Amino acid sequence: MRGQAKSLLKQGIAKFRIKTHDTNSETEDNSAKYTQILRGAISLQKPFNIVQIGANDGVHGDPIYDFVKEYKHSTNIILVEPVETLIPHLKENYAYHPSAEIVNKAIGDMSSIRLYGVKKEYWADVDVEYGEDWPEYRIPTGVTTTDKDRLTEWIAKNVQSKSKTEEIIETFDVDVSQPGSLVERSQIMDEVHLLQVDTEGMDDEIVYSFLEGGTHPNIINIERKHLTKEREEEYNQKLADKGYELCDYTWREKLALRR
């Protein structure tokens, strides 16, 4: 799979003309190209094992949902979501899938982690330009983060309320699972082919925890828009050192393939 997948990604990048430094246009089209690459990968590897960190509700704004649904009988997927209120939605949206595990934890190397989110009573006050057709819970739960300062800035721009920011923010602790134990305890997979990460600014740290724990997915996709230039450069170097080739296929996402 590794050699074949490497060749596949190179062919996919060439075929669909995904350019690493020209990612500010055709965002939707480039996202579709990611799906095409995954279709090519699954043609070489069945079942195709996926771990998704920061799954939210599993549907809205999710880059792999349509792919997984199309190949429900050829994929195994572990969906990790730390926000407990989202678990019923995630279970409902993945009820169709015959081989899905849902884990209500965060990922890391500690016993618990502190997260910051928007209190439910303020969800109706959220005013953003995206996700107009999404359910009310999706946008405010999607900005839950370990970075309180980042959430504070987001609230100042996107929550129309006279309340003080501290009154809008909820703080909660969640249990943490190490990447290795996540797979070890799984009943559906013992290796990871695709690691899909969206954790509001902690994507690089999540990937490092998998690699340092001995899990080396063939394909890794992260949301890079929250990374500083320095952190993104460090991420690029660390993954290159681990044997990955990287591609910034949209202005917000980064794909890596293991050699």
Image (cartoon, rainbow, N blue to C red):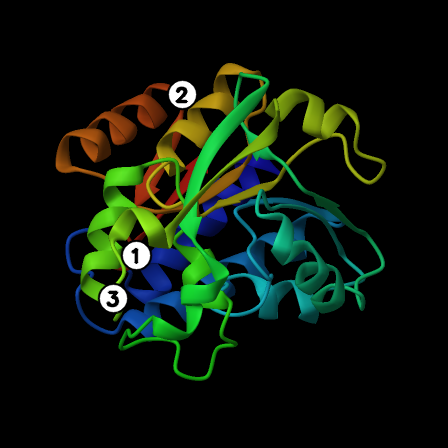
Instruction: Say which amino acid is labelled 2.
Output: Lys
Q: In terms of depth relative to the viewer, which is nearer, 177 or 48?
A: 177
Q: Are marks 3 and 2 in contact (CB under 8 Å)?
A: no
Mark 1 nearby-residue class (10 Å; few <14, some 14–19, many ≥20) = many
Tell us which disc is closer to us: 1 or 3.
3
Q: In terms of depth relative to the viewer, which is nearer, 63 or 132?
A: 132
Left or right: residue 50 versus residue 167 is right
Whether residue 193 is situated above or below residue 96 in the rendered picture: above
Residue 251 visible to an observer of this rendering: no
Q: Which residue is mark 1?
A: 249
Left or right: residue 3 versus residue 252 is right
Q: Which mark is residue 158?
A: 3
Mark 2 nearby-residue class (10 Å; few <14, some 14–19, many ≥20) = few
Mark 1 falls on what kind of element?
loop
Q: Position of residue 178 (x, y in %)?
A: 61, 22
At 68% from the left edge and 54% from the top edge, which residue is drawn? 87
Mark 3 falls on what kind of element?
helix
Q: CA distance from mark 3 to mark 2?
A: 39 Å
Instruction: Say which amino acid is labelled 1.
Output: Tyr
Tell us which disc is closer to us: 3 or 2.
3
Left or right: residue 28 versus residue 36 is left
Q: Position of residue 104 (x, y in %)?
A: 67, 42
Mark 2 falls on what kind of element?
loop
Instruction: Say which amino acid is labelled 3.
Output: Asn
Q: Looking at the image, is mark 2 or mark 1 earlier in the sequence?
A: 2
Q: Which residue is mark 2?
A: 242
Whether residue 246 is situated above or below residue 156 in the rendered picture: above
Q: In terms of depth relative to the viewer, which is nearer, 205 or 7?
A: 205
Q: Position of residue 156 (x, y in %)?
A: 19, 58
Q: Quadrant of the C terminus?
A: top left
